[in-house]
Amino acid sequence: MSGTRIFVVGVGNIFLGDDAFGVEVATRMKRRPAIDGVRVDEYGIRGVHLAYELLEGTYDLVILVDTLDLGEEPGTITVFEPELDGGEDVAPDAHDLEPAAVMGLLAGLGGSVGRMLVVGCQPSAMDEHMGLSAPVEAAVDEAIRVVDELVQEQQSTAPAVIAGL
């Protein structure tokens, strides 16, 4: 077993169509049996709450799941590692979940995380309605598979915990 702590967090606004993607991924993942060392939760649009949660925990890896508009086909899954220098002064905005904003607030509070990855999905419709579009709904299982791979990769590269030390 590794001593790695991983936090998978789904974000987004459930009232803006495909923006609920991250929340849906986290909700489905929470229905599965827990994996040792991995916490899964959804934070909706509560950016300040997420920053405070990150301040309380020591995570080796945070995987943020959200929509990500890169001009791709709707439902396309992309993984990237945002630049998190923590040097920016970011005014707290309870609804801003851009990685730089959350990490800037976290840094301002004196905290940090080991590493952050974003698993993003190209949205189709982000107008005021509830429910994911067909291509984004179809991408939820793929995103879960990608998150699982990232978790396994992180756990396999972490040093093993030696009992009694």
Image (cartoon, rainbow, N blue to C red):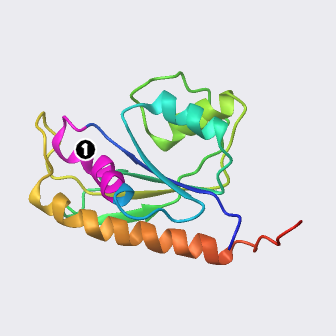
Query: Where 3 sits versus 129, above or below?
Result: below
**Split into 4 quadrants, where in the image is the C terminus?**
bottom right
Q: Which residue is mark 1?
A: 19
Is 59 displayed left or right of 150 in the figure?
A: right
Compared to residue 112, the image places residue 157 above or below, namely: below
Q: Name the residue: 17% across, 59% down.
A: 137
* Residue found at x 35% / y 66%: 144
Q: Secondary structure at mark 1?
A: helix
Q: Which of 13 and 162 lies nearest the eye of the viewer?
A: 162
Range covered by the magenta-colored residues: 14-28
Q: Amino acid at mark 1?
A: Asp
Q: Quadrant of residue 154?
A: bottom right
In the image: residue 130, left or right of residue 95: left
Say above or below: 86 vs 159: above
Residue 34 lies, in percent from the top left, at 47, 62
**What secondary structure do most residues of the magenta stretch adopt?**
helix
Residue for point 75% across, 74% down: 160
Whole-percent x and y of residue 97? 43, 37
Choose between 81 and 6: the one closer to the eye. Answer: 6
The number of numbered badges drawn on the structure is 1
Q: Tell whether position 26 is magenta.
A: yes
The magenta stretch spans residue 69: no
Q: Is residue 138 left or right of residue 151?
A: left
| Residue 87 image offset from top left, x and y in percent | 67, 36
